[in-house]
């Protein structure tokens, strides 16, 4: 019986041409998709500029002509009749346009930013952020990380601003003196409520859960972080050591090493992290990169113990805690007030 062996037939010239043509088609599709994104952004910017001008005019008429709720309601009805099929001119939205203009008209730093993000995101920030510093943080973060409505609301609800400001206040002298500016990058505590951990879990369980929810963890870490690996091996002498998680931060141009601890912070943990950071800098850091930064992510920490431990080390490290339940914003604000007493360059958080 004749045995039919399968033989690989090389691609013909026509197949190569077809393959190249499809590659060219894909490139054109990519150009179209990028153009669509730019067009959407351009439309959004024009819409915000339109709303800004409407808000400016409304503000002027309310002050000079005593326009009130009834006139604005009449204006809304009239606009909807004159612009059928165009949404956005409800009385509530018209008042928001006035609020947007009056809130940012004298702020040269923030007024350009409001035109760069969506109207919905602007409305969320106006409604939920009461202080100028907080609005600045969420405007810049939304623009940089391209947060949508759901992610922005989650970040505000979880107190991302307060947690970031707390971290900035607690940076050690060693970290402050790094060539890369780390302010606004790290958080004092990380909200990991998306992890489905058992009641009693080990460090390996925490690590596995974070990897299984890597996209959500990267969102919580913030813009600029890229995942490099887990259980990253470094060899010192004749022994191998494993670092829990390793990331790279594009803006800082450095590796960020995470060590996980499912208990309270202990000063001895810092020695272990310092060992990994030094090994990474010697073995894996490239010449153009900045020094590696380490983060000890613990279940809880005593700030006085942390401050003393960091003051006695030359390691560029941060100590953060993680929460598997949402931290009340008022608790975070109270912590900010307490820590403000120790620093000269405080932001106004009492208004």
Image (tube, helix red, strand yellow):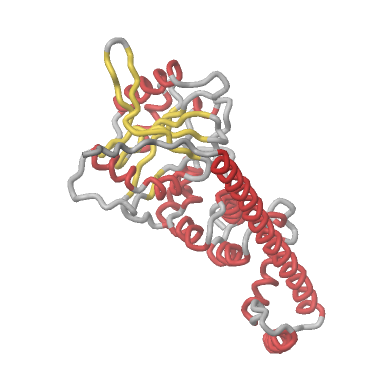
Residue at figure coordinates x 72%, y 55% from the top left: 112
Residue at figure coordinates x 31%, y 30% from the top left: 231
Seen as rendered, the residue at the extreme left is: 200
Q: x and y percent of residue 351 in the render?
A: 57, 58
Q: x and y percent of residue 79 in the render?
A: 73, 84
Residue at figure coordinates x 28%, y 42% from the top left: 208
Q: Is residue 135 left or right of residue 237?
A: right
Where is residue 81, by image quadrant?
bottom right
Q: Is residue 197 left or right of residue 214?
A: left
Q: Quadrant of the N terminus?
A: top left
Where is residue 95, by image quadrant?
bottom right
Q: Is residue 37 visible?
A: yes
Against 98, is 103 above or below?
above
Seen as rendered, the residue at the extreme right is: 64
Against 256, is 274 above or below?
above
Q: x and y percent of residue 271 in the render?
A: 33, 22
Against 272, is 339 above or below?
below
Where is residue 268, by image quadrant?
top left
Residue at figure coordinates x 38%, y 28% from the top left: 308
């Amino acid at each position: 019986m004749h045995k039919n062996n399968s033989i690989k037939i090389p691609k013909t010239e026509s197949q190569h041409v077809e393959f190249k043509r499809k590659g060219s088609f894909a490139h054109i599709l990519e150009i179209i998709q990028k153009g669509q994104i730019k067009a959407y952004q351009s439309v959004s910017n024009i819409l915000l500029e339109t709303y800004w001008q409407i808000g400016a005019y409304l503000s002027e008429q309310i002050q000079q002509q005593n326009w009130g709720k009834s006139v604005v309601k009449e204006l809304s009805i009239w606009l909807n009749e004159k612009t059928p099929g165009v949404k956005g001119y409800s009385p509530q939205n018209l008042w928001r346009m006035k609020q947007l203009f009056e809130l940012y008209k004298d702020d040269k730093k923030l007024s350009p930013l409001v035109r760069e993000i969506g109207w919905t995101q602007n409305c969320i920030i106006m409604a939920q952020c009461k202080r100028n510093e907080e609005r600045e943080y969420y405007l810049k973060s939304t623009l940089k990380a391209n947060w949508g409505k759901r992610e922005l609301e989650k970040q505000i609800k979880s107190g991302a601003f307060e947690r970031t400001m707390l971290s900035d206040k607690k940076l050690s002298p060693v970290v402050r003196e790094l060539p890369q500016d780390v302010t606004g990058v790290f958080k004092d505590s990380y909200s990991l409520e998306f992890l489905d951990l058992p009641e009693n879990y080990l460090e390996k369980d925490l690590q596995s859960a974070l990897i299984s929810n890597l996209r959500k963890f990267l969102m919580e870490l913030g813009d600029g972080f890229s995942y490099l690996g887990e259980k990253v091996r470094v060899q010192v002498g004749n022994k191998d050591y494993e670092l829990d998680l390793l990331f790279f931060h594009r803006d800082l141009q450095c590796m960020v090493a995470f060590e996980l601890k499912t208990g309270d912070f202990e000063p001895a943990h810092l020695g272990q992290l310092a060992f990994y950071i030094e090994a990474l800098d010697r073995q894996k850091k490239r010449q153009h990169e900045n020094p590696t930064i380490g983060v000890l992510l613990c279940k809880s920490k005593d700030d006085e113990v942390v401050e003393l431990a960091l003051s006695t080390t030359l390691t560029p490290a941060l100590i953060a805690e993680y929460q598997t339940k949402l931290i009340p914003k008022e608790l975070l604000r109270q912590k900010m007030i307490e820590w403000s007493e120790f620093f000269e360059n405080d932001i106004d958080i009492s208004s």
